[in-house]
Image (cartoon, rainbow, N blue to C red):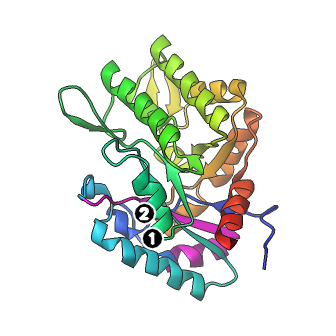
Amino acid sequence: MKQNCSGTRVNLHTHTAHCRHASGLPADYCAAALEMQFNILGFSDHAPYPDDRFHGSRMFFSELEEYRHEIVVAQEAFPQLKVFAGLEVEYCSDLGGAYCSDYLLGEVGLDYLIGAAHFVKITDGSMHPFYADFPATPEIIRAFIRQTLETMENLPIVYLAHPDGFASRVERMTPELKSGFRDIVALAVERNIPLEINANGVRRGKFVIDGCERYRYPWTPFWEIAAEGGAKVVIGSDAHHPQHLILQYDECEEFAKSFGLPVVNSEIAAEILRKKEK
């Protein structure tokens, strides 16, 4: 039976205790989602990799089957809520796109993937996370821009999470950063990939630089470029606790409205549902 996703409250960015920096099982988030009047809930924990890279902030590869099963159990326990199973992925050149398209979406049978850039490697071989203390060097920022573009170019994602997340590591706008932002927006529009306004960035609070107060992300200069470029947006709770589902969600919607950015959560959910029903 087909369902209409219009006029619904949707969140497709939800983590669980499997990622090691969140709490709660899928069933806990489903119970909270109903209380908060969400109609559609998508789980998108950080994707594990066969060699367990980045395992400090995500499930081990051996946990993937358990994660998938927990989502199925939650869906059965909360039939009044539409539940999707997904993962948050980043492009890894050694794996290419096949790991995501053939294995995660194909063999594992996930419903969707969202893209993000969390870790980058620079020329000296060192790895850098986007959530580290700032400021970052220009080389690290260039690596994040490159990683973001490669994720959109190579992976079958339904949207791009916190596209300005690495801006938490910069103190102010530079010509090079602005150029990189424009490249990200242009590719997103070309590929019809919505960009996420991330509520977790709002929950992280503000800091002051040069006498000005701002969120680490979402960062206004990026979204000015996104609006000028004609981007579409998704509001993502990026929930790491069941109560996070609604925190700052409405504030992010107002943020999108202030730039005239079209919010397409329901449209993305409807597309996931169409593919799931085939």
Residue 203 location (% of width, % of height): 50, 49
Closer to the camera, 52 or 9? 52
Task: Tell me the SS state at disc 2.
Answer: helix
Figure check: 111 above or below 74: above
Extreme top residue here? 175
Give yes or no for residue 1 being in the magenta stretch: no
Say whether residue 140 is left or right of residue 236: left
Task: Examine the rendering and report whether any part of residue 236 can be seen.
Answer: yes
Q: Amino acid at mark 2?
A: Tyr
Which residue is tagged 2?
Answer: 103
Q: Which mark is residue 94?
A: none
Which residue is tagged 1?
Answer: 108
Total numbered labels placed on residues in the image:
2
Magenta segment boundaries in residue numbering: 27-50
Task: Examine the rendering and report whether any part of residue 44 can be seen.
Answer: no
Q: Quadrant of residue 192?
A: top right
Closer to the camera, 70 or 49? 49
Q: Amino acid at mark 1?
A: Val
Extreme bottom residue here? 77
Figure check: 174 above or below 9: above
Q: Quadrant of residue 133?
A: top left
Residue at 81% in and 68% down: 4
